[in-house]
Amino acid sequence: MFVYTKTNFSNPDFRKLIEELDNEFLVRYPFLHQVFTPFNLLDQNARVVMAYFQIMPVGCGAFRLVDERTIEIKRMYTLPLYRNQGIGKSILNQLEKWARAEGFSVSKLETGINQPEAIAAYEKSGYKRIPNFPPYVEVGESICMEKYL
């Protein structure tokens, strides 16, 4: 059984999973990793949801505030061994619910062309492709999406 908890960007389990995510990005986007690094930084206002199996962190996701009505989903990741079990979907649902409770009405995100499983999951969750928003406007490997909460 998986347990989900709300936390923030300073959570050490979150930081550990983000290292794993960054390592995966190095494989999927070897020439773009440095380009994306500044876009993936989170500040103290970021909201984070962690997934645990027993006491082991197995998944995470976050959102950052864009403006008074918009959030951006960031740093979605599930350990490979735990994929295809609904963890990412549950994290995304909880992030959206948290954002709605705080009065946000739009969720945006960016993913990449080398992540077909993420693209499919976001589309299944109701996200629609939109023109790339800053800072991804000139990044051909980026796919931006949006959903009204």
Image (cartoon, rainbow, N blue to C red):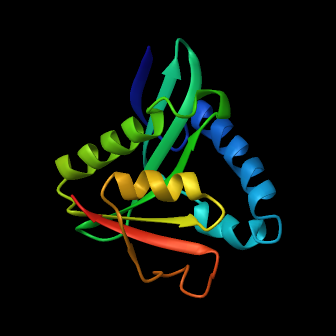
Q: Where, quadrant-wise, is the C terminus in this rendering?
A: bottom left
**Residue 43 visible in the current orientation:** no
Q: Give above or below for 145 relative to 13.
A: below
Q: Classify residue 7 as left or right of residue 60.
A: left
**Residue 131 visible in the current orientation:** yes
- Residue, x 50% and y 59% (percent of image)? 119
Disc tally is 0
Q: Classify residue 89 as left or right of residue 69.
A: right
Q: Quadrant of residue 15?
A: top right
- Residue, x 61% and y 68% (percent of image)? 113
Where residue 138 appears, x then y in whole percent?
60, 88
Q: Where, quadrant-wise, is the N terminus in this rendering?
A: top left
- Residue, x 82% and y 64% (percent of image)? 30
Q: Quadrant of residue 116?
A: bottom right
- Residue, x 57% and y 34% (percent of image)? 83
Q: Nearer the viewer, residue 7 or 138?
A: 138
Q: Nearer the viewer, residue 124 or 104?
A: 124
Q: Give above or below for 85 relative to 41.
A: above
Q: Quadrant of residue 68?
A: bottom left
Q: Give above or below for 90 relative to 23.
A: above
Where residue 5 appears, x then y in whole percent?
40, 28
Where residue 100 appears, x then y in whole percent?
20, 51
Where residue 20 appears, x then y in whole percent?
71, 41
